[in-house]
Amino acid sequence: METYLPAALAFVFALIVDQLRRKNKGLERQLQDLEGKLQAVQVKKPTSQPSASSVSPLPQPLAKRFDTATGLPTRESFLERVGKQLKQESETDNTTSALILMKLDGFRTVRDGLGEKKAEELLMALGHAMPVAFGANSALGRLSEDEFAILVRGLTNPDQAAELGATFRDQLSAGFSLPQVDRKIGLTATLGVAPWTPQYQKTEDWMADADSALGEAQNLGAGRLSFYSNTMHMRSVERWRMEGDLRTAIDQNILQMHFQPIVHLPTGQPAGFEALVRWMDPIHGFVSPADFIPVAEKSGLIGPIGELALRQSCAALSAYRKLFPDANLFMSINLSPIQLQEPGLTSMVRAILAQSGVPAQSIKLEITETAMAAEAEKAKDVLQDLRHLGVSLSLDDFGTGYSSMAYLDSFPVSTLKIDRSFITEIAEDEGKKEIVRAILQLAQGLNLEVIGEGVETSKQKEALSSLGCNYGQGWLFGKALPADEVPAWLKENQMGLHAK
Ligand code: C2E
Ligand code: MG
Ligand code: MG
């Protein structure tokens, strides 16, 4: 028999498995054996690799179970396999298993660099290498374009899973030979490992922990491997709890926008505000947006939070502009990169602007420099649409990200907000002062406004002013105020802030 089992034959096996399953549920064990055999045959090294084009499209039920590009089981069939393993785990006690999630770092770039055809060949090579590397005792799956999963069974120690993962990662970076390519094509992969524990009742729980381990590995950097740990468990429980509380807080209208003054430095006049969301939880007290915004971004709650931020901020600005018509106040509102991916963003902004009656020109949307560098290309159209509405765009925490200089010229940004870390030491540290000077020169050349963030002392304000920065924001001028305290603050300071 051919040592290489063509993808089509694998699908026939799968079809038989499906039919058997339907006939008799009691045959479950036999089915698993069959699937084991199927994988064992796949493990044998192919004598020749099929070209990507030789694989014909699959009939529907098979396409659902096997990924055409790699020949590996799909997410759906992999998850089914994990579910079965969970049922079995409780019965066996001398061996254990572990889940590995593996993400190919920068696969899109590799794909773009190689071109579609070669990328398909690379995936096919990967699909052949994985069963060989992880052995017949493992189940494999392709979860998304660049994410793979491995269920390693029969382990006497969970560390063995990490060893297998690390060895395969090294094999990937050593590279694959592709037809008509004179060099090997290497890949970097980041891995998260979650050993089985009796606490796992559901597939999702085990997958979520493997995902946390992968997230931890990604935080450490490309090509890293992390084990799921108790600390991660505590963190994910905490995140899960926070997500529930945040949902309740949104439903009960507990989140409120507060407004921090932004001051025109040459005159000391209030120029506008930055809207900052505040969560005073009845049980946990004040929760910082720096803690809950990332949770909201991961759980889909950033949508409703973003909407309430826009609504409350535009309504407040409308009231302040009526009370102080000569001040020409603006409002700066933070926008999460996740919001940029939501299809209805521009129409929501348009509707809220119309409802509140504030001119679009009085609204600045803040996007962090890091998010901009990561999303700019994908979000180009949305950013242009927003700009066409008349709102302006601000680059937040400027100076902390990298590589966005290139975007400054081609993206519709009108304001830079220099990060607090530069302002804090501007009066003492010549280096920081020089960076601020350079940013101001760059901004002048590109005709951008600049706001210095986190001004806490008069010395910092003076240093910033002397370099020619027009706007400042920070505790020296005021902390973020509840909406109803802003009019009194404006009244007190409308003649110009003579800060202490
Ligand atoms: P950010 O947009 O850079 O906001 C500035 C942060 O610096 C705010 O922290 C503000 O209270 C703080 N700050 C202002 N002046 C000073 C100062 O003089 N000294 C010091 N030490 N801190 C100062 P906050 O309110 O905790 O917000 C943290 C981050 O959370 C914000 O950073 C922003 O990225 C995010 N965030 C806040 N509100 C929203 C929102 O409505 N939507 C989204 N997507 N993100 C938000
Ligand atoms: Mg901001
Ligand atoms: Mg900032």
Image (cartoon, rainbow, N blue to C red):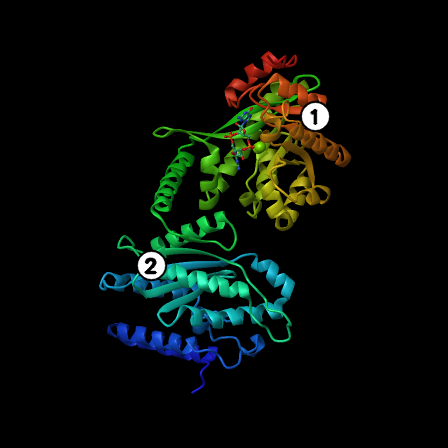
Picture coordinates of residue 22, whole percent (x, y) = 31, 74
Q: Is mark 2 within 8 Å of ligand 1?
A: no
Q: Which type of secondary structure does the marked residue at label 2 adopt?
A: loop
Q: Quadrant of the C terminus?
A: top right
Q: Which residue is mark 2?
A: 158
Does 473 sit left or right of 39 as displayed?
right
Kind of residue at disc 2: Pro
Q: CA distance from mark 1 to mark 2?
A: 57 Å
**Which circle marks residue 469 in the picture?**
1
Q: Nearer the viewer, residue 169 or 150?
A: 169
Residue at the spot 55% in from the left edge and 43% down from the top edge: 339
Q: Nearer the viewer, residue 459 or 78?
A: 459
Picture coordinates of residue 473, whole percent (x, y) = 60, 24
Q: Nearer the viewer, mark 1 or mark 2?
A: 2
Picture coordinates of residue 333, whole percent (x, y) = 58, 33
Q: Nearer the viewer, residue 467 or 242?
A: 467
Q: Quadrant of the N terminus?
A: bottom left
Is residue 448 visible in the rendered image? The answer is: no
Q: Is mark 1 within 8 Å of ligand 1?
A: no
Disc with the residue nearer the chain's start (1 vs 2): 2
Q: Name above or below for residue 264 compared with residue 148.
A: above
Does 450 sit left or right of 234 as displayed?
right
| Residue occupying the far right of the picture | 445
Q: Name which quarter of the figure residue 239 lies in.
A: top left
10 Å neighbourhood of mark 2: few (<14), some, or many (≥20)? Answer: many
Q: Name above or below for residue 75 compared with residue 61.
A: above
Q: Name which quarter of the figure residue 154 lies in.
A: bottom left
10 Å neighbourhood of mark 1: few (<14), some, or many (≥20)? Answer: many
Q: Which type of secondary structure does the marked residue at label 1 adopt?
A: loop
Residue at the spot 44% in from the left edge and 45% down from the top edge: 299
